[in-house]
Amino acid sequence: MKNILILTFIILFIIFIYYIMEQRKNFNPKIFLRNNLVNNYNGYIIPPFGVFIKESEKDNQALIEHEMTHWKQFQREGIIPFLINYSMEAFKNGYDKNKYEIEARTLEDDYCKENYTECVRNGTAKTVYNPNFRS
């Protein structure tokens, strides 16, 4: 019985690794719409599964483009390096100064690229308006 469980785990792990590798080639990830997202975010990615967008923002092409930049970052770096590098960057520089976030803010002006939380909360961000963003 123990050997069957170990073999099952190994097979599932190999399938998951294959799935991750295939998703790195996927330029059209699944978009999941949700009523609420963690920390009042409007969107984020969970590699290798897809892009999560707040239901109220489903037609917001600027936000989808922002999240697609993160998907491209995952494709470029791979899942483990992306998650580690993004997390280290966020820990070191915070959310607003995170180079991965700044790269994804292509539509924002220079001020909002580095002060995104403030711009989203006060309505000057081109991507989205959310007075409760990250609260």
Image (cartoon, helix red, strand yellow):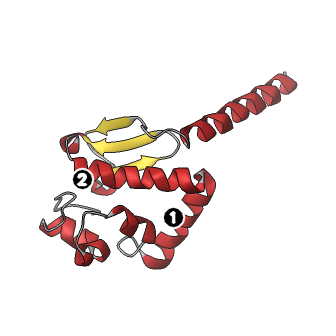
Q: Is residue 77 above or below residue 108?
A: above
Q: Report helix, strand or loop for mark 2.
A: helix
Horizontal and vertical percent position of residue 37: 32, 48
* Residue at x-position 33% and y-position 55%: 66
Location of residue 100 (image quadrant): bottom left
Q: Report helix, strand or loop for mark 1.
A: helix
Q: Could you say which is closer to the camera, residue 131 or residue 100?
A: 100
Q: Report the residue that reaches farthest toward the left.
A: 123
* Residue at x-position 62% and y-position 55%: 80
Work out how far the residue at label 1 is from the one at label 2, CA to CA, in angstroms.
Answer: 21 Å
Res. 36 visible in picture: yes
**Horizontal placement of 17 versus 59: left or right?**
right
Q: How many numbered marks, from 0 up?
A: 2
Amino acid bearing label 1: Tyr
Horizontal and vertical percent position of residue 55: 23, 39
Location of residue 82 (image quadrant): bottom right
- Specify the quadrant that holds the C terminus: bottom left
**Horizontal placement of 115 versus 29: left or right?**
left
Horizontal and vertical percent position of residue 27: 45, 40
Residue beneath disc 1: 86
Location of residue 10 (image quadrant): top right
- Specify the quadrant that holds the N terminus: top right
**Which comes before the other along the chain, label 1 or label 2?**
2
**Horizontal placement of 124 versus 51: left or right?**
left
Q: Is residue 97 above or below residue 33?
A: below
Residue beneath disc 2: 62
Sort mark 2 into few (<14), some (14-19) or many (20+) by Cα contacts within 10 Å. Answer: some
* Residue at x-position 40% and y-position 55%: 69
